[in-house]
Structures are given as C-alpha cells and as structure tokens.
Image (spheres, rainbow, N blue to C red):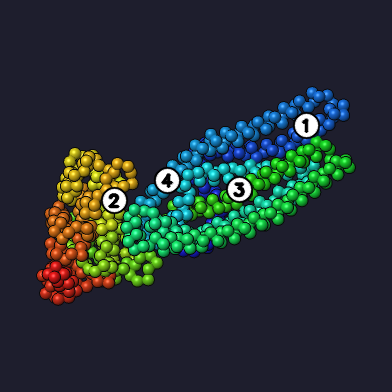
C-alpha cells in the first residue's frame, strides 16, 4: 500500500509524469473528443504566426497602394486571408473549448466520482485511523470540486496554444531579424516567470496549512451544527471556540498575505522591466524602418508579433503556474487512488463460518501512529455456534478485537485464522457476506425507515415481508407503528418532511438492520447503551434467540447480559485476562468478579 506522506512538503510530485498520466487517463475516458480537441488546439497555436505573416504582406501592399505602385485589388487577397485566419482561429477555439471540452469535462467528473466511491469502499478501514490520511483525502477531493477539470483542461490547452504561438511567431520574426526575437523574450517573459515562482511557493504554503484548515473547519462545524449546540451553550463554549477559530484563521491568513504582498511587489518591478523592453523594441524597429533595415509591413507585423507573443507567453507561463498547482492536486488524487486494495492478490473463498472455528494466537494490534498496542498477545478460540461475550472497561480493546475478527482490521502481530485459513488469505467480501454486526456507533441514514432497515441485506429489500420480519426481531416495528407513513417515513433532519427519532428508537432501527441478514457470524457491539436495563435484556434475549446455532459475539458493559452467553472473555488493557462462564469467573474472584461486585453494588444502592 502507498504510504501516506506525513510531511507534505517533502511530497513534491514530478509534474511531467503526472501530466502524462492525466492525459492518458483523459484519452482512455473519451478517445475521440480528447484527440480531436488536442488537434484543434494545436492548429490554433500555429494560426497567430500565419496572422503575423499575412499582416506583413497586407501592410506592404497597403504602402504600395498608397505610393501608387500597386492597384487596390492587390490588397484584397491578403485582406481576405487575414479575415479567414482570424475567423478560423475563433471558430476552432470555440468548438474545442465549448462543445468538445464541456462534454469531456462531464465525462471525466463522472468517472472520477465513480473511482473515488470505489476507492472509499475498498480501502482498509485502518487507513482511516491516520491523521495524515485525512489531510491527503482533503487535498485529493479538490479534484472533485465543480469546474476543476474544466479549468485544468483549459490551462493545458492554453499552454499548448501559447507555446506553439511563441515558437512559431518567434521563428517568423527571427527570420526577419534575430534582435526582434530577443526583444520579444524581454517583453514577454519576466512577469509570468515571477508569477510561476510565487504561485508554486504559495501552493506549498497552503499545503503546510492543511491541518490548521481542517481544524478550523471542524470548529466551524461545532459552532454551527445542531448536534453540538446543546453543549456549546450549556458549557458556554461559544466564546472560547470562536476565539480559537479566529486564532487559526490568522495563523493561516498572515503567512499567505506576506507571500502575496511579496508576489505583487516583485511583479510590479518586472512589469516595469517588460514595459521598458517594449518601448525599446518599438523605438529600435522605427529606427530600422528609417534606415531601410525593415519594411513598413515588417514594422507593423512586429507590433502584432509583440502582442501575439506577449499573449502567448502569458498563456504559457501564467497557465503553467496554475497548471503546476493543479497537477499537484492531481498528484494527491492519484496518490489517493493508488492506495492499496482491500483484498490481497490470491485471496481464497471461505466455505462457511458456521462450521469453522475462529482462532487467534498471540494476536496483537497497534493503530497507525500510536505508540502503544491496543491489543497484546490475545490467544482464544471461538467455536462454531458458540455464544461469546466480551466484557471489560472502556479502552480495554473490545471493539478493536471485534473489528479484527470481522476482518475490518488486519493484525499487526500474531495469527488470526478462520478454520485452517489465515486471515490474510481470506476474501473479505465472502467473510462479510457471512457476517452481520450492530455497532455502538451505528449509522443514521437520512432515508426512509424501511431503507434504514433493509440496508442490512439490500439484495432482499424488495422481497415481501423481509423488512417487517427484521423490524419485529429488532424492535423497530413499534417505531414504524407510530410514524405517519410507517416504513416509508423519511428519517433524520437533513431533508424536508423527515422525522427525527429518539436515541433509543434509532438503536432499535440499527439492531433491526442487523437482523435483516441471516449470517453465520453475528456481532452485537454495545448498540444498546441508550436503552434501559430491562429493554436491553429484552433485546439481548431476542438477539440470541435469532442467532440460534450461529456463532455469536456480544460486547456489553452490563454484565447481566453477558450471563446469557456460553462463555465470557474478560479484557483489560488490551490483554485477555480471564475466560469462562459467569459462575466460573465469580468463583475465581478475579477481574470479572470485581466488575460484577461493582455493578451489583450500584443497583443494590
């Protein structure tokens, strides 16, 4: 898997390689529009040189007509040629940058969003635990913003036409007098080159500020969203959080201001140099005309050439600075798309979890960028059809162990096997197809009640009675009975006409979603925290009854629910310290017995 770079300044992508990869990606998406638009832009880049040559001939003929040496009709072919070249340039550029480019942009945006969605589904879950990964994805998402590809393709095309214009006009003018070519370079290059230098430095400055910008956006969310409004007001956090946000704002804005102030000062000085060079070039050309070194037509054509070259260099260099920044964003996008897939090559299918034991030996796990292990040397066996409870204090590693057993995380040490198959050889898709889980941080989908439940097995959502059956098992049928449109009622507050549920009702919906799937491995990871003890006990009884002879893993803080399981595993500080039935653990008078006594004392008063 590609490593996420912790120091973004060190990650300086090779612009040419990124550009070639981008153009290849564009051509694969729509070959004929891509090639045709590039050909049209190539043609447009050569037409200004033709214009310069035609203008010279037109002015020379005009002088001949004025002096009486040539008839007026001698001007007409060159006048028609000038008009034809001008109209051709306008027409070709319009066709390329509107008709072709707009459609090409839409297809590229569609393909990019599709690839981003595929990547987000296939990435290993542990990658999301890295802070620098979130910096990378924030930068990569820039490419998905509306208009990004249109601006990027426009920059590439302007650079292509600008480069061809400068080269072709330079060849024409240099053929007349090499000193004119030097004048064109002095007039055209200084300001754009300064812009390129400063824009690249500004990009890296903003890149270093990614973490501060993410923190500022997080503070904005806390200050403005409904979920956080209660605590912000009760604890009077508005002033301190707003002050923190203001500090971060100026922490980002001040260096950016100093960078741009320097850019404008340098640009002003170089513009003065460019203007002086232009005045010198015009004066020298006028002197050359008086001395017979240049014709009147060449003088007029030189003025046109200066304008054409200046425009071409502006497009070339200014767009190059813009393109350099955009290519860095594209490089971030490619770095994200290059992150390793979920399944290793050569993964094999899993027969059935209902007949295979899940075993671990010296299993360890450490989160990315963490100094200590979340789990250390866990050795256990979950037999087929066994009901196992995981108990322990907060932070003991229960949820982490569940995610490892479900294949969401991969061990950083030790062994995890499904029957005789090591975890790193098992197809994750087949493992998840045979598993169901209800997590403590379940998702509240802003869709209908029926869809919230049916997502547990979306392939069977349309089968009659499936959603209702799962709702009865999970207790969401009572929620449906009180809603105005039953299972067709939209939930949440994101969209107009939706209905918000209480915490306990949302938990019943999440549990019902887990019941949609008749899986061989069933996991319940503390989703009943908002339920009272009686309601929780009822959910556990129905959950274990639904599980039947399936392998079942239950995580709970309330030890009374753990008594319903065949075996209890006790975790403490990431280690498995005890295992056995409730009665066996009470007799041992260890960690479990201490926890039981504390909870019993709380209820006994």
Q: Earlier in the sequence, mark 2 or mark 1?
A: 1
Residue 537, percent from left and from top? 14, 59
Residue 430 seen by the camera: no
Mark 2 touching mark 4, by CB under 8 A?
Answer: no
Q: Residue furthest right?
A: 291
| Drawn side of residue 111 relative to residue 462, left or right | right
Residue 310, percent from left and from top? 70, 45
- The local crowd at label 3, few if under 14, some if 14 to 19, many if 20 or more residues have their Cα within 10 Å, is many
Q: Quadrant of the N terminus?
A: bottom left
Measured Cα–Cα span from mark 3 to mark 2: 45 Å
Question: Can you tell which of label 2 and label 4 is closer to the viewer?
Answer: 2
Residue 58 numbered mark, or none: 1
Measured Cα–Cα span from mark 1 to mark 3: 32 Å
Q: How many marks are shown on the rendered structure?
A: 4
Measured Cα–Cα span from mark 4 to mark 3: 25 Å
Q: Nearer the viewer, residue 533 or 237?
A: 237
Q: Identify the residue shown where x is 57% and y is 49%.
A: 323
Q: Earlier in the sequence, mark 1 or mark 3?
A: 1
Measured Cα–Cα span from mark 1 to mark 4: 52 Å
Mark 3 touching mark 2, by CB under 8 A?
Answer: no
| Drawn side of residue 373 relative to residue 544, left or right | right
Q: Nearer the viewer, residue 121 or 203?
A: 203
Q: Nearer the viewer, residue 170 or 138?
A: 138
Which residue in the protein does label 3 denote?
Answer: 319
| Residue 220 placement: quadrant | bottom left
Residue 113 numbered mark, or none: 4
Q: Nearer the viewer, residue 575 or 562?
A: 562
Q: Does dot 4 land on a helix, a strand or a loop?
A: helix
Q: Residue furthest bottom?
A: 589
Q: Earlier in the sequence, mark 3 or mark 2?
A: 3
Measured Cα–Cα span from mark 2 to mark 1: 73 Å
């Amino acid at each position: 898997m590609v490593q996420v770079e912790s120091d973004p300044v060190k990650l300086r992508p090779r612009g040419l390689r990124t550009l070639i990869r981008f153009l290849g990606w564009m051509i694969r998406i729509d070959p004929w529009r891509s090639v045709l638009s590039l050909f049209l832009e190539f043609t447009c880049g050569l037409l200004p040189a033709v214009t310069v040559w035609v203008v010279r001939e037109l002015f020379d003929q005009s002088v001949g007509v004025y002096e009486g040496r040539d008839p007026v009709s001698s001007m007409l072919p060159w006048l028609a040629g000038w008009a034809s070249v001008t109209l051709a340039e306008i027409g070709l550029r319009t066709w390329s940058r509107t008709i072709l480019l707009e459609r090409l942009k839409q297809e590229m945006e569609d393909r990019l969003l599709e690839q981003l969605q595929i990547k987000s589904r296939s990435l290993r879950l542990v990658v999301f635990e890295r802070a620098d990964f979130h910096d990378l994805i924030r930068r990569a998402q820039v490419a998905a913003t509306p208009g990004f590809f249109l601006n990027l393709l426009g920059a590439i095309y302007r650079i292509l036409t600008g480069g061809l214009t400068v080269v072709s006009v330079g060849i024409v003018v240099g053929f007349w007098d090499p000193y004119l070519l030097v004048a064109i370079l002095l007039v055209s290059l200084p300001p754009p080159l300064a812009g390129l230098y400063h824009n690249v430095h500004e990009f890296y400055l903003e890149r270093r500020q990614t973490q501060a910008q993410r923190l500022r956006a997080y503070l904005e969310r806390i200050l403005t969203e409904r979920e956080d409004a209660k605590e912000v007001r009760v604890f009077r956090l508005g002033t301190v959080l707003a002050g923190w946000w203001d500090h971060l704002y100026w922490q980002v804005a001040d260096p950016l201001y100093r960078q741009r102030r320097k850019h404008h000062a340098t640009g002003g000085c170089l513009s003065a140099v460019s203007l002086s060079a232009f005045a010198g070039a015009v004066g020298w050309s006028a002197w050359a005309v008086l001395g017979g070194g240049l014709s009147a037509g060449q003088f007029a054509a030189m003025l046109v050439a200066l304008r054409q070259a200046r425009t071409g260099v502006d497009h070339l260099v200014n767009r190059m600075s813009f393109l350099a920044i955009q290519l860095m964003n594209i490089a971030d996008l490619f770095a994200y798309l290059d992150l390793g897939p979920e399944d290793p090559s050569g993964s094999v299918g899993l027969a059935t979890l209902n007949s295979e034991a899940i075993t671990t030996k010296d299993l360890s796990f450490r989160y990315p960028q963490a100094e200590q292990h979340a789990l250390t040397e866990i050795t256990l066996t979950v037999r087929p059809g066994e009901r196992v409870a995981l108990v322990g204090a907060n932070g003991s590693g229960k949820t982490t162990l569940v995610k490892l057993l479900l294949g969401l995380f991969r061990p950083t040490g030790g062994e995890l096997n499904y029957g005789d198959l090591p975890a790193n050889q098992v197809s994750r898709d087949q493992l998840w197809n045979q598993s169901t889980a209800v997590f403590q941080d379940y998702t509240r989908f802003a869709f209908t009640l029926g869809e919230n439940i049916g997502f547990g097995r979306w392939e069977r959502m349309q089968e009659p009675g499936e959603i209702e059956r799962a709702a009865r098992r999970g207790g969401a049928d009572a929620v449906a009975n009180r809603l105005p449109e039953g299972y067709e009622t939209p939930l949440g507050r994101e969209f107009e006409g939706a209905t918000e549920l209480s915490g306990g009702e949302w938990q019943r919906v999440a549990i019902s979603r887990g019941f949609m799937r008749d899986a061989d491995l069933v996991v319940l990871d503390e989703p009943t925290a908002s339920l009272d003890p009686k309601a929780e006990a009822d959910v556990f009884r129905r959950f274990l009854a639904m599980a039947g002879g399936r392998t079942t893993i239950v995580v709970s803080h309330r030890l009374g629910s753990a008594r319903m399981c065949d075996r209890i595993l006790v975790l403490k500080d990431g280690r498995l310290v005890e295992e056995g039935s409730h009665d066996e653990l009470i007799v041992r008078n260890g960690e479990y017995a201490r926890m039981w006594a504390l909870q019993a004392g709380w209820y006994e008063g």
